[in-house]
């Protein structure tokens, strides 16, 4: 079953009400980012966009590893939690189908919090 953006936003607003949407253990979060680094091989200080970032769990791990990050999600409530938890990361509210970044704005794209929702 495919959900429209309005349905998706309502679904994630419910998760935002709990003030947390970190579905993995910290060790698993790090393992996912390890795999991302092994596959994408972003250079030092690479600019990475985390599409479907939710509250920014993976975005924060990337930032902690020295990357310049932007988190994108369609649920503003989840992003507000991310902004509160990691205020030095840029978070943008929009659907990934409507990205307005100029070409070549990023060196790599992380989709780990998004791909299973498509």
Image: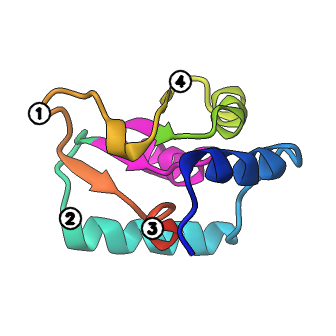
**Mark with earlier residue (1, 2):** 2
Q: Nearer the viewer, residue 18 or 69?
A: 18
Q: Position of residue 4 (x, y in %)?
A: 55, 53
Q: Could you give the CA–CA distance between mark 1 and mark 2, rounded to whole angstroms?
A: 18 Å
Q: Could you give the CA–CA distance between mark 3 and mark 1, rounded to whole angstroms?
A: 23 Å
Density class for disc 2 (Cα within 10 Å; few <14, some 14-19, many ≥20) is few
Give SS at disc 1.
loop
Density class for disc 3 (Cα within 10 Å; few <14, some 14-19, many ≥20) is few
Q: Which residues are magenta?
A: 48-71
Residue denoted by label 1: 103
Residue denoted by label 4: 88
Residue 96 quadrant: top left
**Mark with earlier residue (4, 1):** 4
| Closer mark to the observer between disc 4 and disc 1 | 1
Question: Which circle marks residue 40 in the picture?
Answer: 2
Q: Could you give the CA–CA distance between mark 3 and mark 2, rounded to whole angstroms?
A: 21 Å
Spot the residue most to the right: 18
Residue denoted by label 3: 118
Instruction: Mark 1 and mark 2 in contact? Answer it, CB < 8 Å.
Output: no
Specify whether residue 11 is in view.
yes
| Closer mark to the observer between disc 3 and disc 4 | 3
Give SS at disc 4.
loop
**Mark with earlier residue (3, 4):** 4
Q: Position of residue 66 (x, y in %)?
A: 36, 42
22 inside magenta stretch: no
């Amino acid at each position: 079953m495919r959900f429209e953006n309005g349905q998706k936003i309502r679904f994630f607003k419910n998760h935002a009400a709990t003030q947390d949407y970190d579905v993995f253990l910290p060790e698993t979060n790090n393992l996912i980012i390890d795999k991302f680094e092994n596959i994408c091989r972003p250079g030092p200080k690479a600019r990475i966009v985390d599409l479907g970032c939710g509250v920014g769990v993976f975005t924060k791990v990337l930032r902690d590893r020295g990357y310049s990050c932007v988190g994108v999600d369609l649920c503003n409530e989840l992003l507000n939690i991310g902004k509160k938890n990691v205020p030095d990361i840029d978070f943008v509210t929009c659907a990934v189908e409507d990205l307005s970044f100029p070409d070549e704005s990023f060196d790599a794209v992380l989709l780990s919090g998004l791909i299973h929702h498509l």
